[in-house]
Image (cartoon, helix red, strand yellow):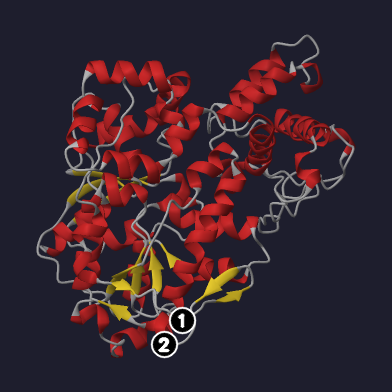
Amino acid sequence: MSATPTNPGSPSRQNVPGREGSLEAPTRHPIDWQSPAFYDEGALAKELERVFDICHGCRRCFSLCNAFPTLFDAVDATSAGEVAAVDRKVFWQVVDHCYLCDMCFMTKCPYVPPHPWNVDFPHLMLRAKAVRTRKEGVSLRNRALCATDTVGKIAGIPVVVELVNAVNGSSAGRALLEKTLGVDPGAPIPKYHSRTARKRLRRLGRLRQGNTPTTAAGNGTTGNGDAARAVSGASSASASPPGAGAKAAQSAAPMTGRVALFTTCYGNRNEPQLNEDLVAVFEHNQIPVTLLVQERCCGMPRLELGDLEAVARLKEHNIPQLIRAIDAGFDIIAPIPSCVLMFKQELPLMFPGDAGVQRVAKRIFDPFEYLMYRHRAGLLRTDFTRSLGKVSYHVPCHLRVQNIGLKTRDVLRLVPDTLVEPIERCSGHNGTYGVKKEFRAASMKIGRPVMQKVQSAGADHYASDCPMAGSQIESGLEAAREPEHPLTLLRMAYGI
C-alpha cells in the first residue's frame, strides 16, 4: 500500500478517473510503514474519506464483515447521504471491525490496484491501526491477548497449566476474564499443554545453531558453511539426504522433499496433536521432518493491532532461523494458515528490500499445498485404509488469500468413498476479534452461515484448516460436536 492514493487530494470518487472494474490481475503495493508520511494523521483522514466514498458508491462488500455495514448504516443515517457527513468517530468503528481477513480485496472489490482508484481496504485499515498504535500505544488488554509466546510459556508450566485450564473452564474464571480482559463468556478459548509439540517431537532433532558467525542476506541472516547445514539429534529418516523421490519432487515443483517445521504458537502450546498429525502424514509419505532451532510468534496477532514495530522484532528473530533451514536444504511448513500467510505475504510487503524475507516467502508452504505438489509429481502415497465418508470442510480466509486453490479439498478427495463439501465463508473468529465481548455478537453473525451449513450437512466429519475457526464453528452448533483438523482426517484415512 502506498502512503498516498493514486490521485492524491481527491477525496471524492467522482473526481478520480477510472472505470468500473478491472481486467488486470490484482496487485499489492509495499506497505510503506517506515515512512513518516505513513503516520500523517491528516493524510490518513483524507485517504479514509476517499476510500470510504468509493465503498459507499459500490457496496459490494456489505455481506463480508461488519466493517462495511457500520460504514453504510452511518452514511444512510445522514441527511446528505454522503461519507462527508459522517461523524469521524464512526471511521474508527469501521477500523475496529476490520480484522484483516483480506476477503474484500481478494474476492469483491473491482477497484484494487492496478485500477487507478487504488483501493486496498485491508491495508488502509492496517495503516489506521498503526497510526493509532503509534499515538496511543497498545493497551494492556491487547498486549495480553496477543502475547501468545509469553502467555503460552507461563500457562504451559506443569501444575500451572492444570490451574489455568481449570480456571478458564469455570464460570468464575470466565467472569474474571470478562472483567479484566473483556473476553466474552461464550467465546471459545483454547486449552494449554505443558507437553508442547516441540517436546513431543523432540525425536525429530533440530537444525544445529553452530558456532560459525552468520552473514547478512539483505536485511535477513543466513547461515554460513557446514555448521548451518548440520542436523543435531535427528532421526535417521530426518538426517538422511534426499533420495530419488525428493529429487523427482524438486524437478516437478519448487521444493526439496525435506521440511523444517514451524510449529506456531497455537500448534505448539494449544493443539500439539496437530503437529503430531502433520509429522505422521509427512513421514508416511517419506518426507523427512526436522524442527527449527528456535521460533517465536509469526507476528500476525501484532499485525492485526497495527503494532508494526513488534512485528519487525519478531521478524528479526524468525527469519534467520528459517533461512538457516533453507540453506540446509529444507522447505518450511507451518500448520496454521495465518502464520503461513504472514511469511508469504505480509512480511514481504512490509520488507520488500529484505532478501531473507523474500527467500522465505518462496519456500514456505501450507501442508496440503506441499502434499498436492508431491501428488502431482507421483510421490504421494494413496494407500488409504479407510474412507472418510462425507466431510463438511470450512476454508479459512487466510488460506484463501494465499491463492493456492483448494488443496486441502483436493488431497482429501483422493481418499476413496470420500465426499468433501467446501464452505468458502468466514467463520467470524478472526484472531482476537471473535473473543472480545464488544465484537462477539458480530462475529457470530458473520459465522452463522458457516455454522448453519455444517449443521445441515449431516456430514461424518467437519473440519477447518484453522483450528480457531473450528472452535468458533463448534461454539455455534446446536449440539456440541468437536471439529477435526484435515491433517487429523488424513492421518485417520492412512490408518497411522
How would you rate the neighbour count of disc 2 (Cα within 10 Å): few for under 14, some for 14-19, many for 20 or more? few
Q: Which is nearer the N-term, disc 1 or disc 2?
A: 1
Residue 226's label in the rendered image is 2
Q: Is residue 125 left or right of residue 282?
A: right
Residue 85's label in the rendered image is none
For the residue pair 67 and 34, the one nearer the viewer reads as 34
Residue 453 can be seen, yes or no:
no
Q: Residue placed farthest to the front in the image?
A: 211
Q: Is residue 462 left or right of residue 118?
A: left
For badge 1, the amino acid type reads Thr
Circle 2 SS class = helix
Circle 1 SS class = loop
Q: Residue 491 at x, y = what percent?
A: 18, 60
Q: Residue 41 at x, y = what percent?
A: 79, 33
Q: Residue 160 at x, y = what percent?
A: 21, 36
- Kindly identify which residue carries mark 1: 212
Image quadrant in which you'd find residue 221: bottom right
Judged by depth in the image, the label closer to the viewer, 1 or 2, is: 1
For the residue pair 61 and 272, the one nearer the viewer reads as 272
How would you rate the neighbour count of disc 1 (Cα within 10 Å): few for under 14, some for 14-19, many for 20 or more? few
* Residue at position x 17%, y 62% in the image: 416
Q: Is residue 227 left or right of residue 194?
A: right
Q: Residue 367 at x, y = what percent?
A: 34, 62
* Residue at position x 40%, y 27% in the image: 435
For badge 2, the amino acid type reads Asp
